[in-house]
Amino acid sequence: GAGVSQSPRYKVTKRGQDVALRCDPISGHVSLYWYRQALGQGPEFLTYFNYEAQQDKSGLPNDRFSAERPEGSISTLTIQRTEQRDSAMYRCASSPGANLRTEAFFGQGTRLTVV
Amino acid sequence: SQQGEEDPQALSIQEGENATMNCSYKTSINNLQWYRQNSGRGLVHLILIRSNEREKHSGRLRVTLDTSKKSSSLLITASRAADTASYFCATDQGGSEKLVFGKGTKLTVNP
């Protein structure tokens, strides 16, 4: 596709359930980033990949959060045993290069609501 | 944690006026980027300035970078109602490729 695609756009889940959020980056982009954004705040870094390698996962809040990009393209952010505090907009971005010398392109995000 | 801090948090101006937003950051950087986010929507890249650059222009946008003060400013000239959005600065962190955002400035341009 022309841009970064995230699915689903909206997800409502019950507390304790696992959720998987998908990101389809721009074809050929090397780097892929996951962010979480609370209302009225800036995007908070979660993790990023160069190709299939997870380079930095320091922003993942706890071990319930994990991410993978097994073939260096599509990525999945998984949240296990969801809690209400996990409710937020989850955003994915991709970048052509591996060294942040160029802009990042963002998807429209997945709005997660944990009830 | 946030790397950049934008100032002011909110700014309200009249159409036609100029808007200036500032960003301060903490660690050394390779480049600094500015993004715009319209109400609740995706982030759109505006401009990237490298650490060895001091000023950059793109249309009605002017960005300056002062690495000695670890600060940047974004100037929007002749503002329009369509410029109403939140503006974020984002930086890498020197040796890291992690792109870290500030909390943003919410700009309102009144027609």
Image (cartoon, coloured by chain):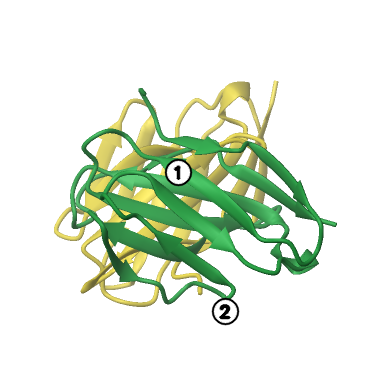
Residue drawn 32% across and 77% down? Answer: B27
Q: Amino acid at mark 1?
A: Cys
The picture places residue A60, in percent across and down from the top left corner, at 51, 72
What residue is disc 2 on? Answer: A62
Q: Amino acid at mark 2?
A: Asn
Which chain's residue wears label 2? A
What residue is disc 1 on? Answer: A23
Q: Report whether mark 2 lies on the same chain as mark 1.
A: yes
Residue drawn 22% across and 48% down? Answer: A30
The picture places residue A66, in percent across and down from the top left corner, at 49, 67
The foreground one among A71 and A30 is A71
Residue lying at the far left of the rendered structure = B52
Q: Earlier in the sequence, mark 2 or mark 1?
A: 1
Q: Is residue A45 left or right of residue B105?
A: left
Q: Which chain is in green here?
A: A
The foreground one among A11 and B101 is A11
Residue A42 visible at all: no
The picture places residue A92, in percent across and down from the top left corner, at 46, 47
Badge 2 density bin: few <14, some 14–19, many ≥20, Cα 10 Å:
few
Which chain's residue wears label 1? A
Hue of chain B?
yellow
